[in-house]
Amino acid sequence: MAAQAASLDIDLFDAETRDAPYAAYRRLRDAGPVCHIERHGLYAMGRYRDLRDALINWNDFSSGSGVAMNDLMNRLMAGTVLASDPPEHKRLRRILGMPIGPARLRKLRPHMRGLAMERVKALKGAGRFDAMRRLAMLLPLSVVSDLVGLPEEGRERMLDWAAAAFNGMAPAGVPLSDGAFPVMKEMVDYITDPGLIGKLRPDGWAAQLWASVADGTLTEEEYRSIIQGYVSPSLDTTIFAVGNLLWLLATHPDQWRALKAAPALQARCINESLRYESPALGFSRLAKRDLVIDGVAVPAGARIMTVLPAANRDERHYADPERFDIRRDASDHLAFGGGVHRCIGGSLAMLEIGAVLEALVELVDHIEPGDGRRADNAVLRGFDHLEISLH
Ligand code: HEM
């Protein structure tokens, strides 16, 4: 007979836990393959193997009624690629993925590399600067503006909208989540404004998609959901990933030296930074039937949080997981999720992060850390402000 899930008295969303979450994640893993967290009205999974298997099993662990941890956000997400199950999911994902397939990304690489090299050259030797604003934001913002092709106005609010889209994922009652909805409404109003169409860059992804609406292959609803798919999940995730990588390299000079000595380790270094400091703290799935997860029962209808960074530090899967080690092959990390919903922008994000890292390795000898302030986001981990200097 299956065991009952252990009940855990932890708050995964309070400021203290978000600031230093790894002890809570260890408690989650040690308490069982799936635990009940009453205060959030959720179950949660943090062990690598069980979580990876659950992400693959979309039939039992469904995204179709949303992957947020509150009903309001799940209603708002209805019809998006993130909040759908196959077969609907497959169609949306195919269209969304067109401009970010391998061949298109290969063509983008020199452009990204050029932007990163120019910026690092300008920042090197220029004293302390906020790496979030001056370096980490550069490529993600350029993707939304230059490639998706959204107009100038609204751009300055884009980051607030993207942050709100993640804050809105947290359980009801978490203050950051409750405050997110008015800001998100602004984004929906912006994207659904008919006046926006005439202002799109003619050669951008948005304009090309709109052409599919005009020829009847895409509905307006699908168009909007795909545009949101390029904006909300692509900014803070990648910005935080670049910031986390900079912070890790600045505070682990031995690892930076190892990278300088062996630049071929760059891909490993990026994967290890995503494993060690995963930007997305997790989403959720709905149990479609009574489930047994590694001997522990979860009732049909339960919402289960997928605590990705907990799995990425699981000692059952990674040797010495608390050590940041750029020589480790961590390419199987779950920072991009897994299964059919594995981040479709993962390769684009790797390209953006890679362009910055390549410029640093080529041009910089030493990264000096300064003060940092963590961003106040319910389901993303990263810096709001991070001072460094490049020598
Ligand atoms: C380091 C940066 C990024 C991280 C850590 C990240 C993380 C994730 C994760 C964990 C998921 C899976 C959600 C789930 O299982 O329910 C996901 C899905 C998704 N991501 Fe990313 N992401 C990043 C960058 C991007 C970028 C640059 C884009 C731009 C296109 C993007 C667009 C999406 C979309 C559209 C989905 C939904 C895919 C689906 O449901 O099939 N992400 N991301």
Image (cartoon, helix red, strand yellow):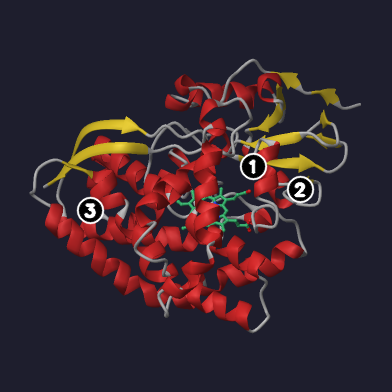
Which residue in the structure is indicated by mark 1? 73
Q: Does the residue labelled 2 lie within 8 Å of ligand 1?
A: no
Q: Quadrant of ligand 1?
A: bottom right
Q: Which mark is residue 93?
A: none
Q: Label 2 crowding class (10 Å Cα cut-off): few <14, some 14-19, many 20+?
A: many
Residue drawn where x is 47% and y is 48% of the image: 162
Residue type, mark 3 in image: Ala
Mark 2, secondary structure of its residue = strand
Q: Is residue 272 visible?
A: no
Q: Where is residue 109 in the image (x, y as percent from the top left)?
A: 35, 71
Disc 3, SS: helix
| Label whose residue precedes the other's in the sequence (2 or 3) | 2
Dividing the picture into quadrants, the one containing residue 168 is top right
- Name the one closer to the observer, 289 or 366: 289
Q: Label 3: which residue?
A: 261
Q: How far apart are marks 2 and 1 (CA)?
A: 16 Å
Q: Earlier in the sequence, mark 1 or mark 3?
A: 1
